[in-house]
Amino acid sequence: MHTLTIALALIVCLIHVYIVVLEMLWWDTPKGHKAFGLKPDFAKATKVLAANQGLYNGFLAAGIAWALWRVDSPALAFFLGCVAVAGLYGAATSSKKILFIQTVPATAALLALYVFGLPV
């Protein structure tokens, strides 16, 4: 796998690890309120839902890390594709900034993966 592909995929992975921390640990804190534009009463009421959402983001990060560790390009393409689609959905239903936080980095990593080949 090409160095650029690995670097971009690692960035996507780290973004999702950070999202896990925000959603599972910091949702009901000033940092979480600021990151997601939440009012404290709403954050408190939705804390459990956010933790569940964070868990799913953790699975995406774990999948990317696993694919990189195994040097498994098809698996990496799958998990990056999942991130890109999740980002599109989030941008359409929640906040346009999700497009730039999730979809753009995942798409850049996917493009690098395809430009530099898909060794199995």
Image (spheres, rainbow, N blue to C red):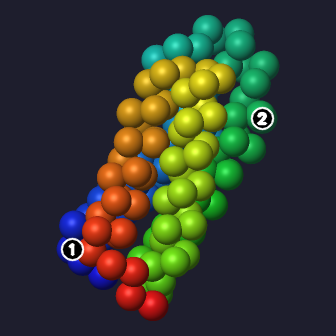
**Residue displayed at 36% across by 69% down:** 114
Point out the frontmost of discs 2 and 1: 1
The x, y position of residue 51, in whole percent, is 70, 41
Is residue 46 visible from the viewing direction of this image?
Answer: yes
Q: Residue at x 40, y 61 (%)?
A: 110
Query: x%, y% of residue 76?
Result: 48, 71
Q: Earlier in the sequence, mark 2 or mark 1?
A: 1
Q: Is residue 109 above or below residue 101?
A: below
How far apart, in angstroms, are the residues tagged by discs 2 and 1? 38 Å
For the N terminus, the quadrant is bottom left
Q: Is residue 109 left or right of residue 43?
A: left
Q: Nearer the viewer, residue 32 or 1?
A: 1
Location of residue 57 in the rendering, given as x and y in whole percent from the top left corner: 60, 50
Q: Is residue 18 visible?
A: no
- Circle 1 crowding by C-alpha within 10 Å: few under 14, some 14–19, many from 20: few
Identify the residue position indicated by label 2 in the image.
48
Q: Residue at x 63, y 11 (%)?
A: 40
Residue depicted at 78% across the width and 19% down the height: 45
- The residue that label 1 is drawn on is 3
Q: Position of residue 72 (x, y in %)?
A: 47, 83
- Given residues 54 and 105, the one toward you in this image is 105
Helix, strand or loop under label 1: helix
Q: What amino acid type should be assigned to the residue bearing mark 1?
A: Thr
Name the residue furthest bottom: 120
In the image, residue 25 sits, relative to residue 68, either above or below, namely above
Asked if 55 appears above or below 24 in the picture, the reply is below
Mark 2: amino acid: Val
